[in-house]
Image: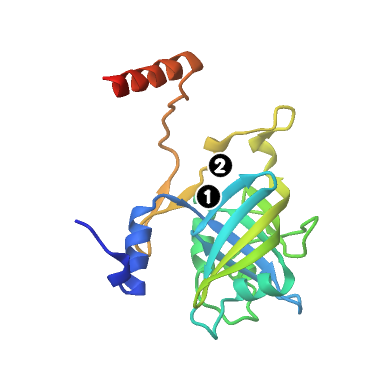
Protein backbone atom coordinates (compact mmCIF):
# COMPACT_ATOMS: atom_id res chain seq x y z
CA UNK A 1 0.00 0.00 0.00
CA UNK A 2 1.06 3.56 -0.69
CA UNK A 3 -0.45 6.50 1.17
CA UNK A 4 -0.48 10.12 0.02
CA UNK A 5 -0.46 12.24 3.18
CA UNK A 6 -1.85 15.19 1.23
CA UNK A 7 -5.10 13.25 0.86
CA UNK A 8 -5.44 12.41 4.55
CA UNK A 9 -7.22 14.36 7.25
CA UNK A 10 -5.21 15.75 10.16
CA UNK A 11 -6.56 12.97 12.37
CA UNK A 12 -5.54 10.25 9.92
CA UNK A 13 -2.06 11.71 9.39
CA UNK A 14 -1.58 11.68 13.14
CA UNK A 15 -2.75 8.07 13.31
CA UNK A 16 -0.34 6.94 10.60
CA UNK A 17 2.62 8.72 12.19
CA UNK A 18 2.16 7.57 15.77
CA UNK A 19 1.40 4.00 14.71
CA UNK A 20 4.64 3.81 12.73
CA UNK A 21 7.25 5.83 14.61
CA UNK A 22 7.58 3.68 17.72
CA UNK A 23 8.66 3.47 20.42
CA UNK A 24 8.90 7.17 21.19
CA UNK A 25 10.51 8.58 24.34
CA UNK A 26 8.18 10.54 26.59
CA UNK A 27 8.92 14.01 27.93
CA UNK A 28 6.91 14.84 31.03
CA UNK A 29 7.33 18.61 30.76
CA UNK A 30 7.07 20.92 33.74
CA UNK A 31 6.60 24.66 33.26
CA UNK A 32 5.55 27.63 35.34
CA UNK A 33 3.64 30.77 34.41
CA UNK A 34 4.31 34.35 35.47
CA UNK A 35 1.92 33.93 38.41
CA UNK A 36 3.88 30.98 39.78
CA UNK A 37 1.35 28.31 38.77
CA UNK A 38 3.09 25.06 37.88
CA UNK A 39 2.02 22.82 35.01
CA UNK A 40 3.07 19.30 34.02
CA UNK A 41 2.07 17.46 30.84
CA UNK A 42 3.45 14.54 28.78
CA UNK A 43 4.59 14.72 25.15
CA UNK A 44 5.90 11.93 22.94
CA UNK A 45 6.81 14.11 19.96
CA UNK A 46 10.14 14.50 21.71
CA UNK A 47 13.81 13.62 21.35
CA UNK A 48 17.41 14.70 21.85
CA UNK A 49 18.81 16.00 18.57
CA UNK A 50 22.24 17.54 19.22
CA UNK A 51 25.09 17.32 21.73
CA UNK A 52 26.78 20.69 21.12
CA UNK A 53 24.85 22.62 22.15
CA UNK A 54 22.95 19.89 24.04
CA UNK A 55 19.54 20.20 22.44
CA UNK A 56 16.11 18.64 22.74
CA UNK A 57 13.03 19.16 20.59
CA UNK A 58 9.45 19.02 21.73
CA UNK A 59 6.31 18.99 19.61
CA UNK A 60 3.44 20.72 21.42
CA UNK A 61 0.10 20.49 19.63
CA UNK A 62 -2.56 22.93 20.78
CA UNK A 63 -6.28 22.35 20.92
CA UNK A 64 -6.72 25.02 18.25
CA UNK A 65 -5.33 28.35 16.99
CA UNK A 66 -6.86 30.27 19.91
CA UNK A 67 -6.59 27.56 22.56
CA UNK A 68 -2.92 26.82 23.19
CA UNK A 69 -2.00 24.30 25.86
CA UNK A 70 -0.58 25.58 29.13
CA UNK A 71 2.82 24.08 28.27
CA UNK A 72 2.99 25.99 24.98
CA UNK A 73 1.88 29.25 26.60
CA UNK A 74 4.31 28.95 29.50
CA UNK A 75 7.31 28.15 27.31
CA UNK A 76 6.43 30.94 24.91
CA UNK A 77 6.06 33.44 27.77
CA UNK A 78 9.00 32.40 29.97
CA UNK A 79 11.38 30.53 27.66
CA UNK A 80 11.98 27.84 30.30
CA UNK A 81 10.91 24.24 30.85
CA UNK A 82 12.05 20.97 32.42
CA UNK A 83 11.94 17.62 30.66
CA UNK A 84 11.35 14.80 33.14
CA UNK A 85 11.82 11.30 31.72
CA UNK A 86 9.15 8.71 32.40
CA UNK A 87 9.63 5.32 34.04
CA UNK A 88 7.31 2.45 34.87
CA UNK A 89 7.15 3.71 38.45
CA UNK A 90 5.71 7.12 37.53
CA UNK A 91 3.70 6.04 34.48
CA UNK A 92 0.33 6.31 36.22
CA UNK A 93 1.14 9.79 37.50
CA UNK A 94 2.24 10.78 34.00
CA UNK A 95 -1.09 9.53 32.66
CA UNK A 96 -2.95 11.73 35.15
CA UNK A 97 -1.09 14.83 33.95
CA UNK A 98 -2.43 14.20 30.44
CA UNK A 99 -5.90 15.22 31.63
CA UNK A 100 -7.01 18.69 30.49
CA UNK A 101 -7.10 20.46 33.84
CA UNK A 102 -7.90 24.14 34.27
CA UNK A 103 -4.79 26.38 34.07
CA UNK A 104 -4.83 27.11 37.83
CA UNK A 105 -4.44 23.40 38.71
CA UNK A 106 -0.97 22.19 39.72
CA UNK A 107 -0.67 18.77 38.08
CA UNK A 108 2.18 17.88 40.45
CA UNK A 109 -0.30 17.80 43.33
CA UNK A 110 -2.95 15.85 41.45
CA UNK A 111 -0.46 13.24 40.20
CA UNK A 112 1.35 12.92 43.54
CA UNK A 113 4.65 14.33 42.30
CA UNK A 114 7.13 16.27 44.41
CA UNK A 115 8.43 19.69 43.41
CA UNK A 116 12.22 19.68 43.05
CA UNK A 117 14.06 23.00 43.20
CA UNK A 118 15.66 23.59 39.81
CA UNK A 119 19.04 25.30 39.65
CA UNK A 120 19.05 27.33 36.42
CA UNK A 121 15.36 27.67 35.55
CA UNK A 122 12.22 28.51 37.51
CA UNK A 123 10.01 25.48 36.70
CA UNK A 124 10.48 22.68 39.23
CA UNK A 125 11.66 19.23 38.25
CA UNK A 126 9.83 16.07 39.28
CA UNK A 127 11.72 14.40 42.12
CA UNK A 128 10.19 11.02 41.30
CA UNK A 129 11.66 11.06 37.79
CA UNK A 130 15.15 9.51 37.72
CA UNK A 131 16.43 11.94 35.08
CA UNK A 132 15.38 15.53 34.44
CA UNK A 133 16.77 18.20 32.11
CA UNK A 134 16.48 21.90 32.87
CA UNK A 135 16.04 23.63 29.51
CA UNK A 136 16.00 27.10 28.00
CA UNK A 137 14.18 27.73 24.74
CA UNK A 138 16.36 28.36 21.72
CA UNK A 139 13.48 28.91 19.30
CA UNK A 140 9.79 28.24 18.80
CA UNK A 141 8.74 27.16 15.33
CA UNK A 142 5.12 27.35 14.24
CA UNK A 143 4.76 24.35 11.94
CA UNK A 144 1.05 24.80 11.33
CA UNK A 145 -2.11 25.99 13.01
CA UNK A 146 -1.75 25.00 16.65
CA UNK A 147 1.38 22.96 15.87
CA UNK A 148 4.40 24.27 17.74
CA UNK A 149 7.95 22.90 17.79
CA UNK A 150 10.10 23.93 20.74
CA UNK A 151 13.87 23.67 20.42
CA UNK A 152 15.57 23.89 23.79
CA UNK A 153 19.10 23.85 25.18
CA UNK A 154 19.79 21.56 28.12
CA UNK A 155 21.38 23.67 30.87
CA UNK A 156 21.40 21.32 33.85
CA UNK A 157 20.70 17.65 34.56
CA UNK A 158 19.33 15.83 37.60
CA UNK A 159 20.13 12.10 37.89
CA UNK A 160 19.14 9.77 40.72
CA UNK A 161 22.26 8.92 42.71
CA UNK A 162 22.04 5.13 42.33
CA UNK A 163 21.93 5.37 38.54
CA UNK A 164 25.18 7.19 37.84
CA UNK A 165 28.90 6.64 38.27
CA UNK A 166 30.17 10.22 38.48
CA UNK A 167 33.80 9.22 37.91
CA UNK A 168 33.00 7.69 34.52
CA UNK A 169 29.82 9.71 33.86
CA UNK A 170 28.15 6.36 33.18
CA UNK A 171 24.39 6.07 33.57
CA UNK A 172 22.93 2.62 34.20
CA UNK A 173 20.23 3.13 31.59
CA UNK A 174 18.70 -0.34 31.92
CA UNK A 175 18.09 0.25 35.62
CA UNK A 176 15.95 3.33 34.96
CA UNK A 177 13.08 1.19 33.60
CA UNK A 178 12.01 3.85 31.12
CA UNK A 179 8.85 3.44 29.10
CA UNK A 180 8.10 4.49 25.52
CA UNK A 181 4.97 5.54 23.67
CA UNK A 182 3.47 3.14 21.17
CA UNK A 183 0.39 3.36 18.94
CA UNK A 184 -3.08 4.53 19.93
CA UNK A 185 -4.13 6.42 23.03
CA UNK A 186 -3.15 3.91 25.69
CA UNK A 187 -0.31 1.73 24.43
CA UNK A 188 3.20 1.89 25.89
CA UNK A 189 6.28 -0.31 25.92
CA UNK A 190 8.82 -1.17 28.60
CA UNK A 191 12.55 -1.02 27.93
CA UNK A 192 13.49 -4.13 29.91
CA UNK A 193 13.90 -6.38 26.84
CA UNK A 194 17.28 -5.24 25.48
CA UNK A 195 19.77 -6.71 23.05
CA UNK A 196 23.35 -5.70 22.33
CA UNK A 197 24.56 -5.21 18.76
CA UNK A 198 28.04 -3.59 18.78
CA UNK A 199 29.07 -1.23 16.01
CA UNK A 200 31.27 -2.80 13.33
CA UNK A 201 34.98 -2.41 13.98
CA UNK A 202 37.13 -0.56 11.45
CA UNK A 203 38.46 -3.69 9.73
CA UNK A 204 35.01 -5.20 9.22
CA UNK A 205 33.63 -1.87 8.02
CA UNK A 206 36.53 -1.60 5.54
CA UNK A 207 35.73 -5.07 4.17
CA UNK A 208 32.11 -4.11 3.58
CA UNK A 209 33.09 -0.85 1.88
CA UNK A 210 35.57 -2.69 -0.38
CA UNK A 211 32.96 -5.32 -1.27
CA UNK A 212 30.45 -2.63 -2.21
CA UNK A 213 33.01 -0.96 -4.50
CA UNK A 214 33.88 -4.30 -6.12
CA UNK A 215 30.20 -4.93 -6.89
CA UNK A 216 29.95 -1.59 -8.69
CA UNK A 217 32.91 -2.54 -10.92
CA UNK A 218 31.21 -5.71 -12.14
Where in the figure is residue 153, as x and y percent of width and height?
A: 69, 54
Whether residue 141 sits left or right of residue 14 in the image: it is right
Res 208 quadrant in image: top left
View extreme (left): residue: 1
63 lies left or right of 37: left
User: In this picture, is 117 found above or below 104?
Assistant: above
User: 10 Å neighbourhood of mark 1: few (<14), some, or many (≥20)?
Assistant: many
As helix, strand or loop, the secondary structure at mark 1 comes to: loop
**The N terminus lies in quadrant:** bottom left
Whether residue 214 is situated above or below residue 7 in the rendered picture: above
The mark found on residue 87 in the picture is 1
Q: Are marks 2 and 1 in contact (CB under 8 Å)?
A: yes
Q: Quadrant of residue 197?
A: top left
In the displayed orientation, state which residue is furthest to the front. 217
Residue 170 spot, x, y in % from top left: 65, 31
Report helix, strand or loop for mark 2: helix
Residue at image position (55%, 86%) is 66
Q: Is residue 161 left or right of residue 49?
A: right
Examine the rendered structure and indicate whether residue 94 appears above or below residue 36: above
> What residue would you read off at disc 2?
176
Taking the image as drawn, is residue 58 in sight? Answer: yes
Q: Nearer the viewer, residue 105 or 139?
A: 139
Amino acid sequence: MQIDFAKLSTKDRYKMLVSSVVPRPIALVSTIDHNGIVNAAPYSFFNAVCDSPPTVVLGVNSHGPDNAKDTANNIRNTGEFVVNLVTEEIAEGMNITAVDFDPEVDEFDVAGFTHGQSVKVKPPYIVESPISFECRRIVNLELGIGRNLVVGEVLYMHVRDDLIDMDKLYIDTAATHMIGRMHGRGWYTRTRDLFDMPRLDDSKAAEIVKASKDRKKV
